[in-house]
Image: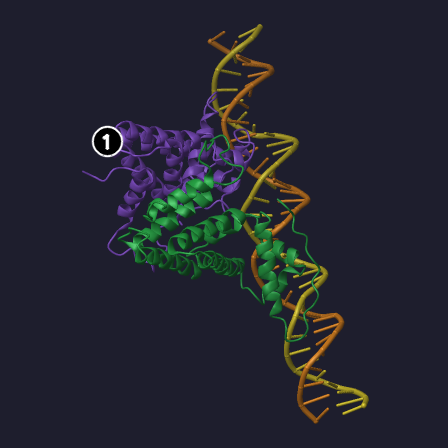
Chain colours: A green, B purple, C yellow, D orange
Amino acid sequence: MATVTGTTHVRNSRGEGDKLRIQIVDSATALIDAGTDASTLSLRAIARAAGISAPSIYPHFKNLDLLVAAVVDASFIQLRTVIRQAADAAENPRDALVSACAAYFAFGREFVERYRTMFSADGYGPESGATLALLEQLLGQCVAAGASKSTDVHGDSFIVWAAMHGMTTIARPSRREDWRLGASDRSALFTELVTRLARLDARA
Amino acid sequence: MATVTGTTHVRNSRGEGDKLRIQIVDSATALIDAGTDASTLSLRAIARAAGISAPSIYPHFKNLDLLVAAVVDASFIQLRTVIRQAADAAENPRDALVSACAAYFAFGREFVERYRTMFSADGYGPESGATLALLEQLLGQCVAAGASKSTDVHGDSFIVWAAMHGMTTIARPSRREDWRLGASDRSALFTELVTRLARLDARA
DNA sequence: TGTACATCAGTGAACGCGCGTTCACTGATGTAC
DNA sequence: TGTACATCAGTGAACGCGCGTTCACTGATGTAC
């Protein structure tokens, strides 16, 4: 785990005190991305990383949970943006769904601890529902275009999401190395998982 | 979260000091099952729950991580037993696999925090591989009996496992209540997920 | 234009708390003679 | 059979630590007159 050394904070000028809020969220995000797990993450550690004193956090966040909630919310927005970009870059609904799912997977694998934090917080924040809704919309477009045989878009998008979540969290790097994946590699398995659950047609 | 009140410990007689080890593991398990999450679980809390003094843990466990590892190992054995019983009670390979998966899901939903702990610890312990191997064996029997079209038992059992894991961890009670599952309920979705990923034939 | 003042951004010291860990100990009990 | 002793199971007090939170403060800067 890398140690996040605190940059010394330069005092914001008058009327710009709210800037620190963003800096605090960014520092907390960096701390989590550096591998600090939920149990080690403390208000004081975040203050150190942000280069400020611990009491300076209070004007911006009443407690650690609300601070983490802000990180989680921002992360869900980031995740949704990444998914949407992947979908928008695709040529057809089927590719859009598959690419979107791949982007989700990639996000979770890149920001392991943050992803975990996003799904550890109670209620997942209001942004998680929007991410699922986006997935549902993409699957709906597949059905409309005749690329998916799904007859329950609502339910199927949920199981796609749940299964992706499992694939994202269970297959961590440096774990389960004793269990070889043989000929089929992990991302191929991931695509296969999405294909079957979304009831996509076999590739032409 | 229920508070686990410590039973007062009666001193073991001579030569039976090892009994405390089991009592400590049991107390830690009870503490976790009562909703104590990983960040709150402490050596002292476990000692309190077991009705002993904190230093009394040291002769049995060098540190908290090793104690939790013991809980995790025992839990994987318990999980595997539950799965195996479900499979053994079934009439055919297909039902065996589906029942085994349902048992897995039920375990994870009953012992939410413990399940989470099992998959939070580094390396998952040596018992997790055995659980996966059991799943693989069940899928293999489905293929042999002509109940599954899988051509990659190794890979397919992995994605079944990963997807179940996602379904187990993401669909927690009291969460996502805003997102209604409509006509199709959760356990039906779970069966559907297993059916598709294990490439089981449509029911007769 | 100059000055007094209110406000703002942020600090440093201090508190009580639960934690992991250590240490010397206590008292019961089996065993050797 | 009696007694001294070693061993065993477990304790209580103490330590230093990082934490969340409070409090009175500091010093820069915009604003009113």
Residue under mark 1: which chain is it in?
B
Q: In the rendered view of the protein, which quadrant contains the N terminus of chain A?
A: top right
Q: Nearer the viewer, residue D13 or B137?
A: B137
Q: Is residue B183 above or below residue B135?
A: below
Q: Is residue B38 left or right of residue D16?
A: left
**How far from the left and from the top, in percent, is residue B134?**
36, 29
Is residue B17 something that shows in the picture?
Answer: yes
**How far from the left and from the top, in percent, is residue A183?**
45, 32
Q: Quadrant of residue A152?
A: bottom left
**How far from the left and from the top, in percent, is residue B60?**
52, 29
Q: Nearer the viewer, residue C30 or A13?
A: A13
Instruction: Identify the residue at image location x=38%, y=43%.
Output: A193
Q: Quadrant of residue D33?
A: bottom right
Is residue B3 something that shows in the picture?
Answer: no
**How far from the left and from the top, in percent, is residue B90?**
23, 31
- Taking the view exactly as shown, the residue that stands out farthest to the front is A204
Circle 1: residue type: Ala
Judging by the rendered image, the residue that carries numbered circle 1 is: B90
Q: Is residue B122 above or below residue B188?
A: above
What secondary structure is marked by label 1? loop
Instruction: Identify the residue at image location x=23%, y=30%.
Output: B92
